[in-house]
């Protein structure tokens, strides 16, 4: 028994050291390509401007109609901790924050990969992610992708856990992911189906899917209400319904029959 415990502790220690080593190496590589004298551009600059506005105003600017505000809201909190008068310092904070989330993604990614592959393969998968040239380049741009990938990976790692409280917590993480990028709301439907199928023999726990949905809604609803009260689209349901409306409108133009709704095209 003691030998078994020692083996488990030794394996856990090696895993911790491995993850720390990979994360430190990945951080060093990424920081080496971050230049503080180069300003942000395109989407990263848009996130930066909204983060600055929210940190100063304490609210969204008037007539702001864009979606996917989670990254900018996080940046607004970080910006408030700095009192620099140089805008490049705030841009550097944004880049470092993006690098940070890209690096810590290694942790949930390892636990997710370990559920489907043996320990060695899971470690290789983490290395592929951390040292991927595309992920390195993407993480230093200061855009929303690093936080989005971290939250989605964390969601899957928690959702496929064997601990029931962790599974419930995954719906909270999915809600946060939806605030960062509204497309995450589409995952709630397959998640419900997988949950019910996975616990088809445990009827008592199946009922907890309602708790998961409530937790998910408790995360995204305050943001939607906040934006709706300001007279702007809620950023989640408004864009999903807008996509459906666009599909129906386009199909109405191209269709020659009385049936204007193409269900298959709508799903796509």
Image (spheres, helix red, strand yellow):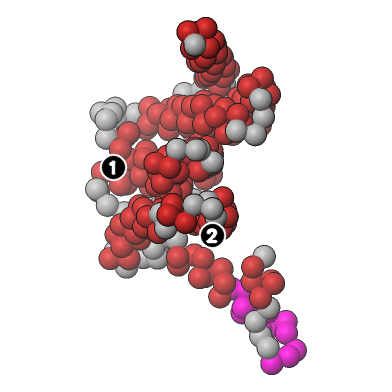
Kindly state the secondary structure of the residue where label 1 is placed: helix
- The residue under the point 39% across, 41% down is 165
Query: What residue span does the magenta drawing correspond to?
Result: 246-258
Q: Quadrant of residue 123?
A: top right
Q: In this view, does 219 lie to the left or right of 190?
A: left
Identify residue for label 1. Answer: 55
Viewer-side residue, 47 vs 136: 136
Which residue ends up furthest to the bottom in the rendered image? 258
Is 195 inside the magenta-drawn segment?
no
**Whether residue 100 is situated above or below residue 21 in the rendered picture:** below
Kindly state the secondary structure of the residue where label 2 is placed: helix
Gap in Å between the C-alphas at discs 1 and 2?
Answer: 34 Å
Q: Residue 12 appears at what percent x and percent y?
A: 51, 15
Instruction: Evaluate whether residue 33 shows in this view.
Output: yes
Q: In this view, does 184 lie to the left or right of 90?
A: right
Is 250 inside the magenta-drawn segment?
yes
**Whether residue 237 is situated above or below residue 211 in the rendered picture:** below
Of circles 1 and 2, the one toward us is 2
Q: Residue 147 appears at what percent x and percent y?
A: 48, 38
Which quadrant of the rendered structure holds the C terminus? bottom right
Q: Residue 32 appears at what percent x and percent y?
A: 55, 17
Q: In this view, does 122 lie to the left or right of 171?
A: right
Identify residue for label 2. Answer: 189
- The residue under the point 33% across, 40% down is 76
- The residue under the point 49% across, 65% down is 239
Crowd class of label 1 (few under 14; some 14 to 19; many from 20; radius 10 Å): many
Q: Of label 1 and label 2, which has the lower sequence position?
A: 1
Which residue ends up furthest to the front in the rendered image? 1
Viewer-side residue, 25 vs 233: 25
Instruction: Evaluate whether residue 186 shows in this view.
Output: no
**Whether residue 107 is situated above or below residue 167 in the rendered picture:** above
């Amino acid at each position: 028994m003691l030998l078994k415990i020692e083996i488990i502790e030794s394996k856990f220690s090696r895993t911790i050291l491995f993850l720390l080593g990979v994360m430190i190496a990945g951080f060093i590589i990424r920081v080496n390509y971050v230049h503080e004298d180069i300003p942000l551009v395109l989407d990263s600059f848009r996130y930066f401007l909204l983060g600055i506005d929210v940190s100063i105003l304490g609210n969204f600017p008037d007539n702001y109609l864009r979606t996917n505000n989670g990254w900018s809201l996080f940046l607004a909190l970080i910006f408030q901790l700095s009192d620099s008068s140089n805008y490049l310092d705030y841009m550097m904070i944004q880049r470092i924050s993006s690098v940070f989330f890209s690096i810590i993604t290694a942790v949930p990614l390892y636990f997710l990969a370990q559920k489907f592959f043996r320990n060695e393969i899971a470690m290789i998968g983490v290395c592929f992610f951390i040292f991927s040239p595309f992920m390195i380049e993407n993480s230093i741009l200061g855009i929303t992708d690093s936080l989005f990938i971290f939250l989605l990976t964390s969601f899957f790692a928690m959702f496929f856990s064997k601990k029931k409280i962790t599974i419930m917590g995954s719906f909270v993480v999915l809600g946060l992911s939806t605030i960062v990028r509204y497309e995450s709301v589409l995952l709630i439907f397959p998640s419900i189906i997988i949950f019910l199928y996975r616990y088809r023999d445990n009827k008592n726990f199946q009922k907890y899917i309602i708790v998961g949905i409530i937790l998910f809604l408790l995360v995204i609803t305050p943001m939607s209400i906040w934006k709706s009260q300001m007279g702007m689209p809620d950023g989640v349901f408004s864009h999903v319904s807008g996509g459906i409306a666009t599909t129906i409108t386009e199909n109405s133009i191209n269709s020659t029959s009385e049936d204007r709704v193409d269900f298959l095209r709508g799903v796509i």
